[in-house]
Amino acid sequence: MGGSAAAGCGVAYEFRAAALFCSKGYRLIGSRVRTRTGECDLIMQNGSRLLFVEVKYRRCCADVVSAWRTRQRQNFLSVVRSYQARFPSCTVEIKFVAFWDGGVRVFDADWRDLAC
């Protein structure tokens, strides 16, 4: 898939992930958030709770899980830390949403448990 086609696909899955969390009472406050040290696909809020979400799509689940490399996670976490510093009274949650052909799974922040 070419660069712009892949980006369009990514936006579509990010929209689906946002809709999933909106159905649970969250509202979208940021998408494709970039700082000088990292990036985060979605930032959602529900009262005093901030939810940071990374979204990936691949053809099969195992490929999705392996697509989120350590360096990407570190960059993602730098965005989380930046927001934590700006909103210290908020509770922070982190999710990884894996989409693959025929499936979706939401993982909690403990990335040791990333398995299909």
Image (spheres, helix red, strand yellow):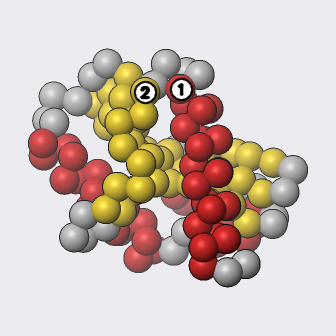
In the rendered structure, the answer to whether residue 30 lies left or right of residue 68 reads left
Q: Nearer the viewer, residue 1 or 92?
A: 1
Q: Mark 1: which secondary structure?
A: helix
Pinpoint residue 88: horizontal percent, then vertical percent.
14, 35
Q: Residue at x 41, y 56 (%)?
A: 32
**Can residue 109 be seen here?**
no
Q: Give the vertical position of 114 relative to 72 (above or below).
A: above
Tell me the crowding category of disc 2: few under 14, some 14 to 19, or many 20 or more residues within 10 angstroms, Cα based: some
- Residue 27 numbered tag: 2
Quadrant where the C terminus sits is bottom right
Q: Label 1 belongs to which residue? A: 22
Q: Nearer the viewer, residue 23 or 4?
A: 4
Q: Are marks 1 and 2 in contact (CB under 8 Å)?
A: yes
Between the residue at mark 1 and the residue at mark 2, the CA separation in whole angstroms equals 6 Å
Say which residue appears at 36% left-offset and 43% top-offset.
30
Kindly identify the residue that appears in the image at 34 percent across and 55 percent down. 33
Near mark 1 (Cα within 10 A), the count class, few <14, some 14-19 or many ≥20, is some
Q: Secondary structure at mark 2?
A: strand
**Residue 87 quadrant:** top left
In the image, what residue type sits under mark 2? Arg
Name the image quarter holding residue 72.
Answer: bottom left
User: Looking at the picture, does residue 44 appear above or below residue 15?
Assistant: above
Three-letter residue code for mark 1: Cys
